Image (spheres, grey):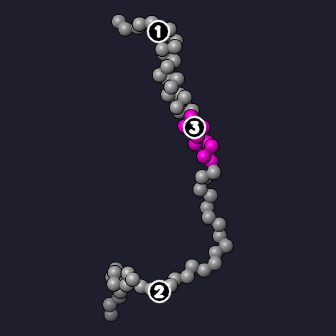
Amino acid sequence: MTCADNTDTDNAGSSEVVTQGDTTEELAETGAGDSLFLLVGAATMIAGGVGFRLMPRLVGGGRNTAV
C-alpha cells in the first residue's frame, strides 16, 4: 500500500473552495499603537548623538587642544 506524499503540483489549479467559517476570536495585540514611545526613543538617541559631538567643543571653548 502506498501513501500520497502531497508533494505533487498537478493540482495547483484546483477550483476546490475551502471555507474558513465564522470566527469570534480577536487578533493579538501587536503593539503598533505604541509608536509614540518609538518616536520619543528615536528623538532621544538623535539628541544624545548631537550632544555627544557638540558638547566637547562647547566645553572646550574652541581652544586648540592638539599637542
Distance in Å between CA atoms under marks 3 and 2 = 50 Å
Place of residue 64 in the rendered image (x, y in percent of width and height, measured from the top left): 41, 7
**Which of the two marks, 3 or 2, is nearer to us in this view?**
2
Instruction: Give the quadrant of the N terminus.
Output: bottom left
Do the residues under discs 3 and 2 have CB atoms within 8 angstroms?
Answer: no
How packed mark 3 is, by other alpha carbons closer than 10 Å (few <14, some 14-19, many 20 or more), is few
Asked if the magenta segment contains residue 21, the reply would be: no
Q: Please report whichever mark, 1 or 2, sits nearer to the chain's N-terminal start.
A: 2
Question: Which stretch is magenta?
Answer: 34-43
Do the residues under discs 1 and 2 have CB atoms within 8 angstroms?
Answer: no
Residue at 37% over, 84% down: 11
Question: Which SS type dominates the magenta stretch?
Answer: helix
Q: Which mark is residue 20?
A: none
Which residue type does callout 3 highlight?
Gly
Place of residue 12 in the rendered image (x, y in percent of width and height, measured from the top left): 38, 81
Q: Which mark is residue 62?
A: 1
Using the image as rendered, state which of residue 20 and residue 3 is in the foreground. Answer: 20
Q: Which residue is mark 3?
A: 41
Distance in Å between CA atoms under marks 1 and 2 = 77 Å
Res. 2 visible in picture:
yes
How packed mark 2 is, by other alpha carbons closer than 10 Å (few <14, some 14-19, many 20 or more), is few
At mark 1, the secondary structure is: loop
Residue at 65% over, 66% down: 26
Asked if residue 15 is positioned above or below residue 58 in the image, the reply reads below
At mark 2, the secondary structure is: loop
Residue at 53% over, 33% down: 45
Q: Is residue 36 left or right of residue 48?
A: right
**Which of the two marks, 1 or 3, is nearer to us in this view?**
1
Q: Which residue is mark 2?
A: 16
